[in-house]
Amino acid sequence: MKNANRRRRAGRDTFSSSFGVLVALAGSAVGLGNLWRFPYLVGQNGGAAFIVIYLMFVVLLGLPILFSEFIIGRRSQASAKAAFQALAPGEKWGIAGILAVLCCTLILSFYSVVGGWGVEYLYKSVCLDLTRGDSDHLANLFSSFASSTWRPLVCHTVFLAATAGIVISGVKNGIEKFSKVMMPLLFIIMIAIAVRSLTLPGGGEGVSYLFKPDWSKVTSSTFLAALGQAFFSLSLGSGMVITYASYVKKDANILSLGAQTAASDTVFALIAGCAIMPAVFAFGISPGEGPGLVFITLPYIFGQLPLGEFIAILFFLALLLAALTSSISIMEVIVAFVMEEFHVKRRTSVLIVFLGLWLLGGLCSLSLGILSEWKIFGKTIFDLFDYISANVLMLIGGLIVVIFVGWKLSKQDMRDELTNGETLHVPDWLINFLAFLLRYIAPTAIIIIMVSQMLA
Ligand code: PHE
């Protein structure tokens, strides 16, 4: 058994360089979470106060959990479930891996639908259909598309098939090469859009909405939404970081990789906020518009930019690619699990996963139209999958991770991974502080926020 394990680990795919790892990790983190989910949650939760709480969670909880998932993945060199089993043989921790796979399944189901919206909007921008009309026209355009039956289904299929195609080619050829080109391009386009939005006449109100906290709007659900978004955006508690970290070489510096991943993710989210909120106010759209916000607001900005048609095409192309670098990482968690559990080849595993997700995603898509009356706990399937994954399963996954690294692994194990067996210098106070956050602060905070929401 040990030999088999060693053989499998020796033959495991790895990322070819630390830049490649960083780009793949940042590629996973930066996606629809930043460009689509963050701006509309900011709008629904009152603006700056939500952002401040979000940033606090990223630093105090997100980063330590990111490091912990790195430690678990790289130390075990195995995917989500097998990783826990390898580090704590014979114990029940593998359940966390199963939860992670379930979580990724729910996420990718609705993620692929939103990715499909990206496909449609790329198509619309190529047909020069986007940069005309007022806010009502753009809002109608979005809602009539998203609630229709066939078109969103076709787009979801295209997006999911593209994801599966990249995942089939494995880590080096697919995921890594792809991410290296797209992330820098997206960054440049987002900056250009943000600059235009911030200088729009009438955008000033949006700027103060983004930067002046109004604490009277904060409730327990603001905290839950901010924590869920921090997890969603950093891809935590979903087994994804564990799985990618298992492909990371033993000499990579976990602390700096984690910090750089979190920093790029946060910068992208903030730029997306700056790109969207001023335009929302300038255009007279309601900030609480919900999931359609980005798709309604951005075409307006494109209309205000020189060469707007061309920028719209570039933007939706980059949005799609950012979504793909994330969706491949989500699918990889499920595919790696199916391969290891059922001993099937990558191709077979991808095919099974594709079919399952195609069905679930189809349900999510229809739940915005003909199935909108089907409600569970008062939510459509789309909203339910989003809520359960980000606000429940990822948080439980993160909780298990911090308890595992904080209490089950020894501080020496943690030190060993963070310093690569004492070859890197990491000050003692930093390791002690991290251990303190992981043992006490992170579990308490996650539990309090989840429980207070249940009681609210
Ligand atoms: N972090 C990704 C985004 O912001 C979504 C994601 C969630 C990716 C979970 C992997 C795992 O779009």
Image (spheres, grey):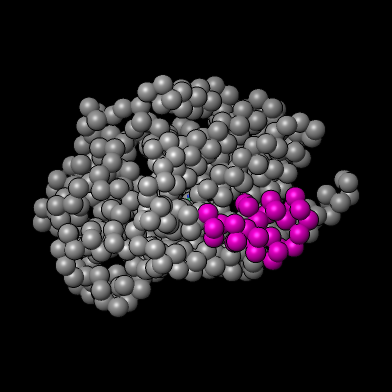
Considering every residue shown, the one lying at the far bottom of the view is 127
Q: Which image quadrant for residue 376?
A: top left
Residue 348 vertical placement versus 392 (above, below): below
Q: In which quadrant of the rendered image does the C terminus lie?
A: top left
Residue visible at 35% across and 62% down in the picture: 148
The answer, for residue 140, to whether it is visible in the render is yes
Q: Which image quadrant for residue 417?
A: top right
Residue 52 appears left or right of 180: left
Residue 402 vertical placement versus 281 (above, below): above
Residue visible at 25% across and 70% down in the picture: 130
Image location of residue 215, percent across then percent down: 24, 28
Q: Which residues are magenta?
A: 333-360
Image location of residue 167, percent across then percent down: 61, 64
Residue 447 vertical placement versus 426 (above, below): above
Residue 316 vertical placement versus 291 (above, below): below
Image location of residue 169, percent across then percent down: 64, 68
Residue visible at 41% across and 42% down in the picture: 375
Magenta-colored segment: predominant secondary structure: helix
Q: Is residue 310 magenta?
A: no
The answer, for residue 18, to whether it is visible in the render is no
Residue visible at 30% across and 78% down in the picture: 127
Residue 302 appears left or right of 183: left
Q: How many numbered marks does the figure carry?
A: 0
Residue 222 vs residue 236, the one in the foreground: 222
Residue 387 appears left or right of 271: right
Residue 323 vs residue 14, the one in the foreground: 323
Image location of residue 352, percent across then percent down: 65, 60
